[in-house]
Image (tube, rainbow, N blue to C red):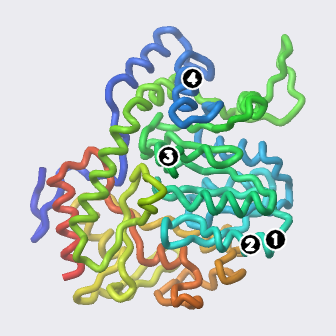
Amino acid sequence: MFEHNGNLKVFESKVWLSSPTMHGEEFNYMKEAYDTNWMSSVGENINKAERMIAEKIGCGYAVALSAGTAALHLAVKLAGVQRGDKVFCSDMTFDATVNPVVYEGGIPVFIDTEYDTWNMDPIALEKAFQLYPEVKVVVVAHLYGTPGKIEEIKAVCDKYGAIIIEDAAESLGALYKGTQTGNFGKIGCISFNGNKIITGSSGGMLLTDDEEASEKVRKWSTQSRENAPWYQHEELGYNYRMSNLIAGVVRGQIPHLEEHISQKKAIYERYKEGFKDLPVKMNPYDVQKSEPNFWLSCLMIEEAAMCKQVRGECEVLYKPEHGKSCPTEILEVLSSINAEGRPIWKPMHMQPIYRMNGFVTREGDGRAKTNAYIGGGSKGKDGKPLDVGMDIFHRGLCLPSDNKMTVDQQSLIIDVVRKCFH
């Protein structure tokens, strides 16, 4: 299990951030597709997987697509986003949340993050509507499997007549007041990428209660073929349908969703216990309203316990200090024992491609002035940083969260993280 590297034990096989966990049924359904020769974008695996997901999530219709990004793209198209339209988007997320807005010619405006759940700040969203009252679409992501303040976000959107596209790619199986994420927006999107809570190796689904909308998406995703005896096309289409082979993997994974969530939660709780006397906090959630799927366990270092760290576009430097640490040091130590961690998502308003887009904090409109963030930064009236996403990115990291990680492996990871502060 271990080999020695100086004073540290090293894992013989890599402990991953989050890798696929297979059970056997997946292969049987894939073989069924092979044996029956239904290998393309129609077949029983697709039909069954769509019905199983719709039933599990509690929505009317689920449309199986090639990726979560494809689902988000068709969601933006379904929402009627036109060239030049501004769209409010979660700021601290993977860029797949945002890019589909640009595919349709929309202009993302980024809404800052809040500390309670690391998701879109409803107060900043309200401010954004005051600045851009014409906006009619909001794309909300649930980060790392933790539901955002969706009730408050929905109230703001309803007040201004905007619809929600819910990016639940990371939060499949997570609950907010007993309801699964993916149900709160006009349209929901989920992902079956290889590192998600359940996987198809790829693939995603669009979720809706509107039968007409689901049929539009099915049509668009198969190159918009008309019901004619030849290939007839009257509008733009896409090659976005999930294959029956991939759907077989998804079909075999769905019954194991709750099992995977339980395993991920145990990992989160062990980290929380192991770090309870360190100057760090685990990624937070509202225990009264939500139950995350605990996809990734993350931590954030207290400001006073941060050693000096500066990040450029592609490089990072830090200065070790006794009793202090930083994400870069912890990630380097994890890598040295053959374990995978990652930085928190770099906020979209800090990305070179989107640096000139609007960015709204709870105290007004602003932009990231530099990506070489050292720490501190401008403070708001509550004494907290004005740019919350930048602060979480600076002080946070994702820990190895693979549900095949053993208790002994996690204990060593906890031990080496603790050593970073000594």
Point 49% across, 44% down: residue: 172
Name the residue type under label 2: Ala
Q: Which sits earlier in the primary sequence, circle 4 or circle 3?
A: 4
Which picture quadrant has residue 136? bottom right
Name the residue type under label 1: Tyr
- Residue 195 appears at what percent x and percent y? 42, 46
Q: Which sits earlier in the primary sequence, circle 3 or circle 2?
A: 2
Which picture quadrant has residue 71? top right
Specify few, some or many for label 1: CA neighbours under 10 Å numbering under 14, 14-19, or 20 or more: some
Identify the mark at residue 46; answer none if there is no mark.
4
Pointers 2 and 4 in contact (C-beta within 8 Å): no
3 and 302: which one is in front?
Answer: 302
Q: Is residue 136 left or right of residue 327?
A: right
Q: Nearer the viewer, mark 2 or mark 4?
A: 2
Q: Is residue 231 left or right of residue 397?
A: right
Q: From what the image shows, is residue 329 above or below residue 95?
A: below
Q: Nearer the viewer, mark 3 or mark 2?
A: 3
Residue identifier under label 2: 128
Q: Which sits earlier in the primary sequence, circle 2 or circle 4?
A: 4
- Residue 233 appears at what percent x and percent y? 86, 26
Pointers 2 and 1 in contact (C-beta within 8 Å): yes
Question: Mark 1: which secondary structure?
Answer: loop
Question: Mark 4: which secondary structure?
Answer: helix
In this view, which residue lies farthest toward the right?
A: 234
Residue identifier under label 1: 132
| Separation (CA) of disc 3 from disc 2 | 29 Å
| Separation (CA) of disc 4 from disc 1 | 41 Å
Q: From what the image shows, is residue 302 above or below residue 70?
A: below
